[in-house]
Image (tube, rainbow, N blue to C red):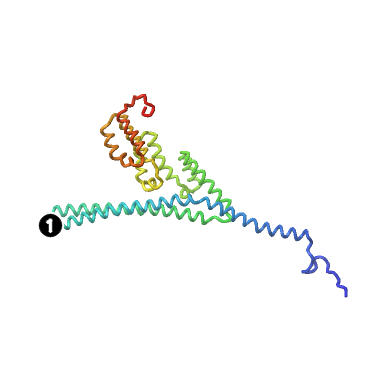
Amino acid sequence: MEIDPLPNGSGSNAATSPETAATTTAITVTSNTAPSSKLSHLTESLKLEHQFLRVPFEHFKKTIRTNHRTVEKEVSAVISSVTDVADSDEISKDDAILSLTSLVSRLQGIKRKLEEGSHAENLQAHRCRARLDHLDSVDAENLSEWNNVRLKRILVDYMSRMSYYDSAMKLAESSNIQELVDIDVFQEAKKVIDGLRNQEVGPALAWCADNKSRLKKSKSKFEFQLRLQEFVELVRAENYMRAISYARRYLSPWGATHLKEFQRVMATLAVRSHTECAKYK
């Protein structure tokens, strides 16, 4: 029995030409590959955002630790004062009133510090949340816009590192990305840099005190070098007794780990500034 062939395109089982099959396959592959490529690019982009979250989070932790230490110290002092007054058998009415007045003033100071600390913590937490929301907002559809914001963030960071603080601030404000950049961190560093340029180590030493544990963990010599320079300046000014006192207090603790440098700088006490010796000149 013969079967009449169906006309082209007249049935669901009609044969598909090789050209049509190839075109259909290409379209399918392209449509599946494009989103996959975007997602892959997005994943690689997010891998570079570690520092974007780390900086505000580290500042948040630092603020919490600082507030905790401050309040703990103040509360301990208040409790100690109350205990001393309570244990005192012979205290006059005037002395008791004076002690209580002093305690009230101190408690008010603690309250003010708690409010300031809470405000600082809230600001840091808000900054962390803003950055998490920014990362969470990215997807394959708005990747181009998100990358544009990212480029501006990188430019602000670069200008801040190159000391173009005003330009960095204006770009951040005009792009409304103040919470997504770390200009305040660079401005703190600027105070240290400006101090060193003016031959003042005070701001740098204050920064070292605030970051003491991290500097110790990284085995940094920055504080030691600052102390050496301050000692040398005292010797240069021929303030020898003060220089010796300074060395005993601030340089001797470094003697165990930096003995050679410590010995060399101490030798400046015996060498005048007009010496021709290259090492001390």
Q: Is residue 201 left or right of residue 178?
A: left
Q: Which residue is mark 1?
A: 89
Q: Tell me the quarter of the image containing the N terminus.
A: bottom right
- Image coordinates for residue 111, horizontal then vertical, percent: 29, 54
The quadrant holding residue 88 is bottom left
Q: Is residue 218 left or right of residue 32?
A: left
Check the image and name the residue furthest to the right: 1
- Image coordinates for residue 57, horizontal then vertical, percent: 43, 52
- The residue lying at 36 percent from left, 46 percent from top is 212
The quadrant holding residue 125 is bottom left
The mark tally for this picture is: 1
- The residue lying at 79 percent from left, 69 percent from top is 11
Viewer-nearest residue: 68 or 247: 247
25 w.r.t. 248: above or below: below
Viewer-nearest residue: 76 or 220: 220
Q: Secondary structure at mark 1?
A: loop
- The residue lying at 13 percent from left, 53 percent from top is 94
- The amino acid type, in three-letter code, at marker 1 is Asp
Bin the neighbour count of mark 1 within 10 Å (Cα to Cα): few under 14, some 14-19, many 20 and up: few
